[in-house]
Structures are given as C-alpha cells and as structure tokens.
Amino acid sequence: MLSTQTAGTTPVLAATGLRRTFGKEGFVAVDDLSLSVEPGQVHALLGPNGAGKTTTVRMCATLLTPTVGQIQVDGIDAVRHPEAARARVGLVLGGELGFYPRASARDNLLFFADLQGLSRRRRRQAVDTALERMGLADVATRKAGAFSRGMLQRLHLARALLGSPPLLLLNEPTTGLDPDVALQVRDLIRELAADGTEVLLTSHSMPEVEELADLISVIGAGRIVTRGTVRDLAAYAGIGMISGFTLPARHADAAARLQEQLGDGAVVAQRPASGRWAVTVYWAVDDSRADREARDAALAAALAEIGTQAPADLVTRPASLEEAYLALADRLAR
C-alpha cells in the first residue's frame, strides 16, 4: 500500500483506522480503513457494491460516526466536533432527495447557505456563483420538484460548492447526467482541484476515475486492498502491458495455441469480432527495455508457430483502469 501524503503538505482530510459496524449482528461494513487527501488532489475510492465506499464517505462527512477510528477535517476532530468539521466539507450524495420540492432552486440554496452560517451578503453571492457554475442560473426560480434527475444532481453539486469548502466528498457526482453535462462536471472537478480543493470521489465510471484521479484506493469487504496510480493497480493485479489484435476466422484455437507458446508470462483470451477473432494478450509486469524486447520477440515467435505473422492491427499498450480492476475482482468480494 502506498502512502497518500507528501512531504510539505497537510491533508485537510485524514482518516485513520476507521471501523463501522451495523445492527445487532455487528455487520462490519468498514474495517481498519485509513486514507488522506492532499490539497489539489483527487483521491478516488473504487470497489464493488457493498464494499464500504458510501459508508466511508458518510463517516468522512460526519453523517455517520465511526465505531472505531479518527477523522480529522482541516485540523478539526470530526468525531468529537462534527458540526465544526461539517462546515469545512462540501458533500454530494446525489439522488432525488435532499431539497424542498416546492421551493425554488435559489431558495433551497439560500436555506442551506444559512445552515452553513454564511452572512447575508456572502450567501447571495455564493448561491449565485454556485448556480452559474453548474449551469442552473436560468432555472434558478424554478421549483426543485420540477427538476429532472440530471438537474437535481447539478443542484446537489451547487449546494456542495457553497462557501468554497476546502474538501469535497463526491459520491457518484455524474450519475444521471447527460454526457455533455457530465463532461462539464468533470472539468469543474479538475478546476477545483487545480485551485487547491481536496476531492474524495467515488464513481462506477472507470474512464471518469482514470481521467480525474491522482490516487486510487481499491476497497473490498470494507478494507483497502491496494492504492496507487492506474499503473500501480495494474502491477498489483499482475498485468504489465496488453497486446491486442485480430486474426482470421480459421484461427478458432488461437488463444489455446498462443497460450501454450507463451507459457506463464502471459494470459491469452479471444472472442469473435465481425467475422474475425479479437485476441488479447495480458502480459505479466515488465518494466525494463529487455523485458519489452523479449515480450515482442516471444509474441512474434508464437504467432509464427501458429502460422501467421504479426497482424497489421497489433497494438501493445498499458492496461486501462477497467482492465486492472477486473483483474482484481476476485480479491474484492466479501
């Protein structure tokens, strides 16, 4: 597991040894989980449904009290002083609840700005800025109950931005948004991080996490399984590079024959694709130039052995986050 802290920076969010149980049976949702987020960093939590991601976010947001563990938010003990800590956090849990349906978008935000203790002068400016940033200024007087799910999600984000908190906790922030609006939200998240805001993000969108996250923690059964960059996660899963190409229909047994030639240094899979076979070779971790040259030579020899040359569409590339995550899936189940 990698450290999330760099010399010379002080994380606004620092959670240590979190454990949370539920019910009389004492179901353990989160167990001995620690994480921190540095200024300007987007830290993503990935894991299957039920892994403990939302429970972790709710504890960091002071909506749940940890059974065991400590949470510091901007130097405040969030377990002992949740209200003070909450004022330093912008939270997006999403969904269709959380607003007064008969009140306008602006009046909803003004109400929440009051709850945050913003002065009358500051709250109006904060609300107008948040509405503008989320593209809701033109519908600010419309009742929240008339909003679509995507518009409500943007209103949740606008609420999180009130008061310019140093920490944003974003649980599935682009759920229900049209692709163009989701792109705007991702741009906003990058912009906020560039300005020094800390972001803890959960998302089921692997491309979104891969695009936004500086650091990724993979959680399974309530514990952090591994942490790092996409490359770190792929290495932990035992994947170095991935070669992909297609072969003619006559090579129905290509995967088995290539696997026999390549041995334990790779895993080969194939599937039908438009009258041809799409072949994928998952190589074990290789970092040196000699390893890469040996890999290329081994693949060329294996293809020659099954009676073909290197296909014109052969591409070798780093593993994506989705590929690394899927390779870890068996280690994440409860």
Image (tube, rainbow, N blue to C red):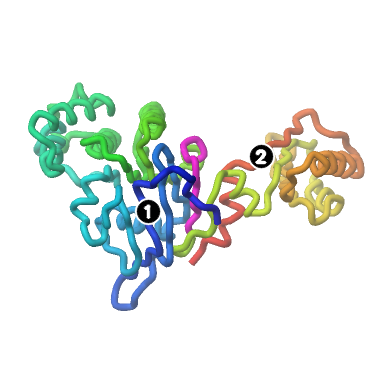
Is residue 70 in the magenta section? no
**Within-10-Å neighbours for mark 2: few <14, some 14–19, many 20+:** some
What x and y, as percent, mark residue 273?
68, 37
Q: Is residue 178 visible?
A: no
Which residue shows up at 56% across the image and 50% down it?
Answer: 325
Per the model, the C-alpha gap separating discs 2 and 1 is: 32 Å
Is residue 214 in the magenta section? yes
Question: Which residue is nearer to you in this view: 315 or 92?
Answer: 92
Asked which quadrant contains residue 312, the reply is top right
Q: Is residue 252 left or right of residue 306?
A: left
Which residue shows up at 9% across the image and 38% down it?
Answer: 102
Q: Quadrant of the N terminus?
A: bottom right
What x and y, as percent, mark residue 13?
35, 50
Mark before the other along the chain sequence, 2 or 1: 1
Give the magenta range: 210-219
The residue that mark 2 highlights is: 318
Q: Is residue 318 left or right of residue 164?
A: right
What x and y, as percent, mark residue 139?
18, 25
Q: Are marks 2 and 1 in contact (CB under 8 Å)?
A: no
Label number found at residue 14 = 1
Circle 2: residue type: Pro
